[in-house]
Image: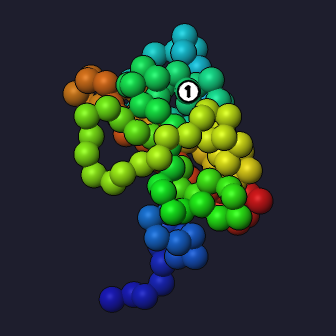
Amino acid sequence: MNDQRRPGTRDPYAGPGASRSLKKPPESVVPGEGPQQPGRIVATRNHDVIRRWAEQRGARPATMPGSEYNGHLGVLRFDFPGYGGAVLRAVGWDEWFAAFDARRLTFRYQERGADGAPSNFNRLEQPHRDEL
């Protein structure tokens, strides 16, 4: 068996779960800009898009208690109604977006799942070192 990597395979230095497709600039989808294909995952840094997506699902901006550092928010989350699990602390949109912008995060989300039903899938990602 040959140990050489095939061209086009995943970058071994990108870290766990990273792929070349995540290195391209995130596409921002604004409501009314085009069709939302079921199952499609898009990315944005647009505050209006993020807030609209969360509010349509009844989600509120939140943080994990105890994750704060030097008076700044720590882990950013959305608190969805009816979900148990970790206890989250509600925060205001201004404070949440200030932390989001300071860390240069990207919001990846899904409008609808592959079955066409509204999706709560979301993930906050930090930029890769080569994008800083």
Q: Nearer the viewer, residue 43 or 75?
A: 75
Residue 24 in the image: x percent, y percent? Answer: 63, 48
For the N terminus, which image quadrant? bottom left
For the C terminus, which image quadrant? bottom right
Direction left: furthest residue: 115
User: Which amino acid type is marked by label 1?
Assistant: Arg
Q: Is residue 15 above or below residue 48?
A: below
Which residue occupies 66% across, 40% down?
A: 95
Residue 81 in the image: x percent, y percent? Answer: 32, 32
Determine whether, in the image, residue 117 is placed left or right of residue 101: left
Direction top: furthest residue: 32
Scheme of colours in the image: rainbow
Q: How many marks?
A: 1
Which residue occupies 69% across, 58% down?
A: 71
Which residue occupies 39% across, 25% down?
A: 58
Residue 113 in the image: x percent, y percent? Answer: 30, 31
Determine whether, in the image, residue 31 is placed left or right of residue 98: left
Q: Nearer the viewer, residue 14 or 71?
A: 71
Q: Is residue 53 above or below residue 18?
A: above
Packing grade of label 1 (10 A; few <14, some 14-19, many >=20) is: some
Q: Does the rendering let one see residue 109?
A: yes
- Residue 82 quadrant: top left
Q: Secondary structure at mark 1?
A: helix
Q: Which residue is mark 1?
A: 51
Which residue occupies 45% across, 40% down?
A: 78
Determine whether, in the image, residue 91 is placed left or right of residue 77: right
Q: Does the rendering let one see residue 21?
A: no
